[in-house]
């Protein structure tokens, strides 16, 4: 069989011995399931440090590096949340213009009413072009 497959006899027997010594590891599968469950319950926000603490609390005594390997093997990655950015400053002393259109979008003639949104334009003062 070794001649047919083109491998040496020592490589074949080495492979067989490794395969016999590594049976289907129940403990490893339990660790992978625990990693997946913890990641799902924490909404995929735990990195390897907090995942290690959670696994240690469940009774699995493993290191951070082993936790990282398990997370990679289970395809668990951290989903970073976007930080909240304040875009509106309601406490200002600037004039507030009245609503002249008053949601009446039907006009008699063209070029009487223009509507636009310029909130995407960057200004030096966070979203405000007025200097007080």
Image (cartoon, rainbow, N blue to C red):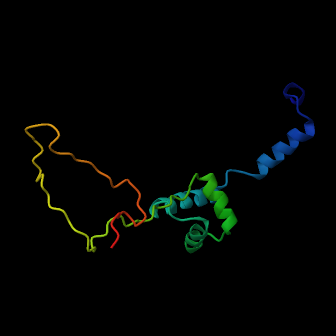
- Residue 120, relative to residue 1: is it above or below? below
- Residue 16, relative to residue 90: is it above or below? above
Q: Residue furthest top?
A: 4
Q: Nearer the viewer, residue 45 or 102?
A: 102
Q: How many marks?
A: 0
Residue 115 pos. (x, y %): 22, 47
- Residue 27, relative to residue 113: is it above or below? below
Is residue 75 found left or right of 15 in the rendered image? Answer: left
Q: Residue drawn at (37%, 53%), measured in percent from left and top? A: 120
Q: Residue furthest left?
A: 108
Q: Which quadrant of the figure contains the N terminus?
A: top right
Q: Quadrant of residue 127?
A: bottom left
Is residue 84 found left or right of 90 in the rendered image? Answer: right
Residue 107 pos. (x, y %): 9, 41
Q: Residue drawn at (17%, 40%), measured in percent from left and top? A: 111
Q: Quadrant of residue 130?
A: bottom left
Q: Nearer the viewer, residue 114 or 69?
A: 114
Q: Quadrant of residue 113?
A: top left
Q: Residue drawn at (45%, 61%), measured in percent from left and top? A: 82
Q: Nearer the viewer, residue 122 or 86?
A: 122
Q: Which quadrant of the figure contains the C terminus?
A: bottom left
Q: Residue drawn at (37%, 67%), measured in percent from left and top? A: 86
Residue 23 pos. (x, y %): 71, 51
Q: Nearer the viewer, residue 44 or 59?
A: 44
Is residue 1 found left or right of 102 in the rendered image? Answer: right
């Amino acid at each position: 069989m070794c001649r047919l497959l083109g491998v040496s006899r020592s490589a074949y027997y080495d492979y067989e011995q490794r395969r016999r010594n590594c049976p289907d590891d129940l403990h490893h599968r339990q660790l992978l399931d625990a990693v997946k469950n913890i990641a799902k319950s924490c909404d995929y926000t735990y990195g390897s440090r907090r995942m290690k603490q959670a696994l240690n609390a469940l009774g699995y005594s493993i290191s951070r590096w082993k936790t990282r390997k398990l997370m990679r093997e289970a395809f668990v990655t951290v989903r970073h949340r976007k930080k909240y950015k304040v875009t509106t400053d309601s406490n200002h002393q600037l004039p507030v213009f009245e609503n002249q259109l008053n949601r009446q979008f039907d006009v008699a003639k063209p070029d009487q009413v223009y509507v636009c949104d310029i909130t995407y334009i960057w200004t030096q003062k966070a979203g405000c072009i007025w200097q007080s």
